[in-house]
Amino acid sequence: MILYQKDIRTVLRSTQVNSGIRKFSNKFSSTQMKSTDVLLRIHDLAERYKEISWASFILASKANMLAVLAEGALVVSRDLKIPKKYECASINPLLIGADKLGAWFAKNSLYDIASNLRVRF
């Protein structure tokens, strides 16, 4: 749900996947941005949207869009292609942002994610 926050999406869009989650989080404390409060909001946003996120996960799982691999409890996309008639240009920034976050989360430990995004698990 953090992707619905325009200020977070803007910084996410300007951060390359290879730069990593640390570079992303450091941008909020840069002299140009001066918005460390944005990072502090992430935990509250995640907490507020926990139920809807879980319901979305269940729906995606039942629709066979996700697979949960028993080994390592890994959740992976089934790479379903969205039919052209259902494509919506307005969600493309959300999809790109989700891909970046997913790549960073996959490469980092929970400790690194929590310390960089200032969240608690």
Image (cartoon, helix red, strand yellow):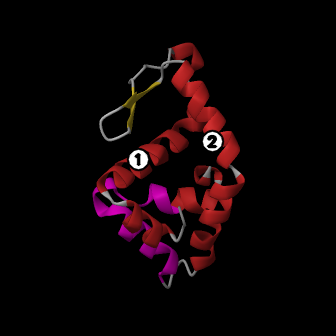
* Amino acid type of the residue that numbered disc 2 sits on in the rendered structure: Ser
Magenta range: 11-30
Given residues 69 and 102, the one toward you in this image is 69
Give the quadrant of residue 41: bottom right
Measuring from the top left, give residue 116's x and y in whole percent. Answer: 44, 70
Marker disc for residue 102: 1
Measuring from the top left, give residue 56's x and y in whole percent. Answer: 62, 33
Please give left or right for residue 40 compared with residue 68 in the image.
Answer: right
Question: If you read the primary sequence from the N terminus, does the residue marked by circle 2 or circle 1 appear first?
Answer: 2
- The answer, for residue 35, to whether it is visible in the render is no
- The residue most toward the bottom is 31
Neighbor class of circle 2 (other Cα within 10 Å; few <14, some 14-19, many 20+) is: some
Question: Between tags 2 and 1, which lies in front?
Answer: 2
Q: Relative to 26, does residue 112 appear above or below in the rendering?
A: above
Measuring from the top left, give residue 112's x and y in whole percent. Answer: 37, 67
Neighbor class of circle 1 (other Cα within 10 Å; few <14, some 14-19, many 20+) is: few
Q: Which residue is mark 2?
A: 53
